[in-house]
Image: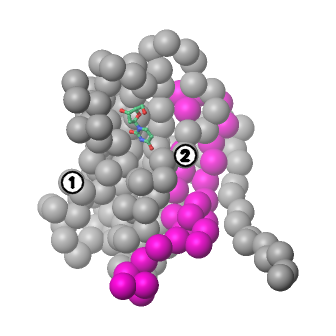
């Protein structure tokens, strides 16, 4: 038996003023859509904005439901919206932000496991990495150069 190490890395920015201009623009779209989230149960609003290679920005926010598991995360709302409108799209980047009406979210909020898995399907198919940029409402921002940097030992169609 030997222990193996999976290498991953990310960039850390102290606040929005440190973000490159195009990332800041995308994050501002994510903030705008976050403010339109339907999150009456968790009070935790999430916004996601995707930049496509054709320059279009596609946004999505979380949509909750009285039957809790029937709700959906912002990231999957956004990627499915993009996938259904632009089937052969290339996604360049995704910006994600979360805010709560109960507490100030000041830590970067990464996508949940199910969203990582969903996004990985698109990254693998397009054969180009998707940059992931995420934050809370305020504070530090994390940026990875690919989705798979967030999902070591991932499952994909090669196993089927
Ligand atoms: N949520 C997202 O929209 N994205 C994530 O990656 C994590 C969680 C939403 C789902 C639910 O509406 C609320 O945040 C609390 O879990």
**Disc number for residue 81:** 1
The foreground one among 23 and 153 is: 153
Figure coloring? one colour
Q: Residue at x 39, y 28 (%)?
A: 45
The residue sitting at the front extreme is 1
Is 12 situated left or right of 35 in this image? right
Q: Residue 134's spot in the image, x, y percent?
A: 54, 45
**Disc number for residue 124:** none
Of discs 2 and 1, which sits in the foreground?
A: 2
The residue sitting at the left extreme is 85
Span highlighted in magenta in the image: 132-160
Is 41 situated left or right of 154 in this image? left
Task: Give the total of numbered labels.
Answer: 2
Q: Badge 2 is on which residue?
A: 110
> Does the Cβ of the disc 2 residue fall within 8 Å of ligand 1?
yes
> Does the Cβ of the disc 1 residue fall within 8 Å of ligand 1?
no
Can residue 57 be seen from the camera position used here?
A: no
Q: Residue 127's spot in the image, x, y percent?
A: 42, 82
Separation of residues labelled 2 and 1 (CA atoms): 20 Å
């Amino acid at each position: 038996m030997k222990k193996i190490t999976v290498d991953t890395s990310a960039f850390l920015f102290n606040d929005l003023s440190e973000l490159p201009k195009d990332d800041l623009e995308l994050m501002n779209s994510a903030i705008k859509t976050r403010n339109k989230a339907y999150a009456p149960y968790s009070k935790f609003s999430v916004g996601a904005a995707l930049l496509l290679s054709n320059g279009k920005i596609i946004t999505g926010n979380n949509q909750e439901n009285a039957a809790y598991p029937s709700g959906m995360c912002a990231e999957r709302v956004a990627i499915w919206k993009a996938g259904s409108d632009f089937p052969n799209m290339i996604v360049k980047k995704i910006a994600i932000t979360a805010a709560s009406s109960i507490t100030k979210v000041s830590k970067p909020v990464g996508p949940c496991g199910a969203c990582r898995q969903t996004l990985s399907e698109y990254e693998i198919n397009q054969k180009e990495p998707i940059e992931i940029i995420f934050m809370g409402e305020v504070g530090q921002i994390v940026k990875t150069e690919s989705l798979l940097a967030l999902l070591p030992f991932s499952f994909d169609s090669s196993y089927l």
